[in-house]
Image: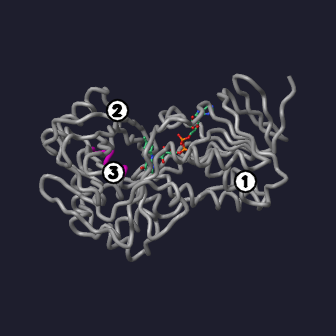
Amino acid sequence: MSDSVFDYIIVGAGAAGLMLADTMGKDAYFNNKSILILDKDPKTVNDRTWCFWEKGSGQFDEIVSKKWNHILFSGPDFSERFSISPYTYKMVRGIDFYSYHINRLQEYENITFRQETVTHIEENNTEAKVTTLDNNYAGKQVFTGMFDYGLMRDQKKYPVLQQHFIGWTIKTKDPIFDIDQATYMDFSVPQKGNTRFMYVLPFKNNTALVEYTLFSEETLPKSEYENALKNYLSEHLHCYDYEILETEEGNIPMTCYNFDSHNTTRVLNIGTAGGWAKPSTGYSFLSTSKKVPQLIAHLKSGKPLSDFGSKNRFWYYDLLFLDVLHTNNALGYTIFQSLFKKRPPQLIFKFLDENTTLWEDIYYIMGCPKKPFIKAFLNRMF
Ligand SMILES: Cc1cc2nc3c(=O)[nH]c(=O)nc-3n(C[C@H](O)[C@H](O)[C@H](O)COP(=O)(O)OP(=O)(O)OC[C@H]3O[C@@H](n4cnc5c(N)ncnc54)[C@H](O)[C@@H]3O)c2cc1C
């Protein structure tokens, strides 16, 4: 069987793949380039809820289904509802994102979307071969969002934590939620030696996504997440009468591992597979939308894909944070509580967006407990 040949092949019609395909489709530079996008799934299921903070309007506003002007940080010793102006916390439902983008792709004559499972990607001097269960394709350049935790398990240089969670969208009998407040982190749940918190996104006063989240090395049996959700609803929200409308679960790598080392001249790992999820938070939706234009500029420059990507000082801050949590996983609550007590959420967002000045970085870092970070810093130095 001869290969079908494309200029570009994108493996994975997820957040990164669809943002990349759409940006290429809109850009006249790619009008005479053929682009294939492959996904094993039809992308018709609402499998995730993306949130991000943003100032003013933004590129996803058309599909943003809820915005909050306040966030709650809570724990046993400290709890505060913050106004986050000029930011808003915005939410995009997975299904809305997929449908919107897949519809748009149909308008671009040079882009083909196929539902096929990729089994292998191999590169030679002139092209990269993409094998699926049904076909063989060749691309001059390939972008892949296929993520494999196994890649980083055999190394010891960088700790690998996981941000793992199960969330329930529930409808309650009584109106119990504040619809202008997202619970960013509620640490008033037993920590059991880890960093464990609840995340609550109210859509209506009786409907919300409630998510039990951990930053830790190992995942839990499903029943433990579910029991924690049940306990939280009854003990903290005094809610006994509810219906589960939807569920979601996730497992995002939190690591400074060098994902770029797997990129080659013609094959680039994108999204989570490319290390685009921020190591200290797991957030990657909005940052991916900023990374994609950089990638487009890189493609136009004609440089090899292996040259894409660079590290900045925030990578090092994330490394120290993960070193601290890896050494003592129970410290998460203390670190976040200290930050939210001492620093405004606007500065926290700016820092996590990697937009702070060096002076702001220092001010932010001074808001964290000092001992564990100094220890982590010295361990990395010597
Ligand atoms: C439930 C959940 C909630 C999240 N919430 C947030 C949030 O609020 N804010 C935020 O910033 N980040 C969030 N994240 C993290 C991150 O933004 C998402 O994981 C995001 O989807 C990552 O984009 P991606 O393109 O790397 O991966 P994905 O969106 O997962 O896309 C990868 C695609 O590759 C396809 N694929 C995989 N293997 C194959 C194969 N062999 N052949 C063909 N196709 C294949 C998959 O079907 C999938 O469509 C969340 C993650 C999850 C799981």
Q: Amino acid at mark 3?
A: Phe
Q: Earlier in the sequence, mark 2 or mark 1?
A: 1
- The image shows residue 352 at horizontal and vertical percentages of 41, 62
Residues at circles 2 and 1 in contact by the CB criterion of under 8 Å: no
Q: Amino acid at mark 1?
A: Gly
- The image shows residue 76 at horizontal and vertical percentages of 13, 52
Say which residue label 1 marks. 25
Q: Secondary structure at mark 3?
A: strand
Residue situated furthest right in the rendering: 2
Which quadrant would residue 11 be assigned to in this image? Answer: top right
Say which residue label 2 marks. 219
| Foreground label between 3 and 2 | 3
Which label sits on residue 372? none
Q: Which residues are magenta?
A: 322-329
14 in relation to 220, above or below: below
| Residue at the spot 44% in from the left edge and 75% down from the top edge | 357
Q: Secondary structure at mark 1?
A: helix
Q: CA distance from mark 3 to mark 1?
A: 33 Å
Is residue 370 visible to us here? no
Q: CA distance from mark 2 to mark 1?
A: 39 Å
Q: Earlier in the sequence, mark 3 or mark 2?
A: 3
Q: Earlier in the sequence, mark 3 or mark 1?
A: 1
Q: Secondary structure at mark 2?
A: loop
Disc 2 residue crowd, few under 14, some 14–19, many 20+, Cα 10 Å: some
Q: Is residue 53 left or right of residue 28?
A: left
- The image shows residue 255 at horizontal and vertical percentages of 45, 46
Say which residue label 3 marks. 203
**Is residue 211 shown in magenta?**
no
331 in relation to 250, above or below: below
The rendered magenta stretch, by its main secondary structure, is classed as helix
Viewer-closest of 263 and 109: 109
Disc 3 residue crowd, few under 14, some 14–19, many 20+, Cα 10 Å: many
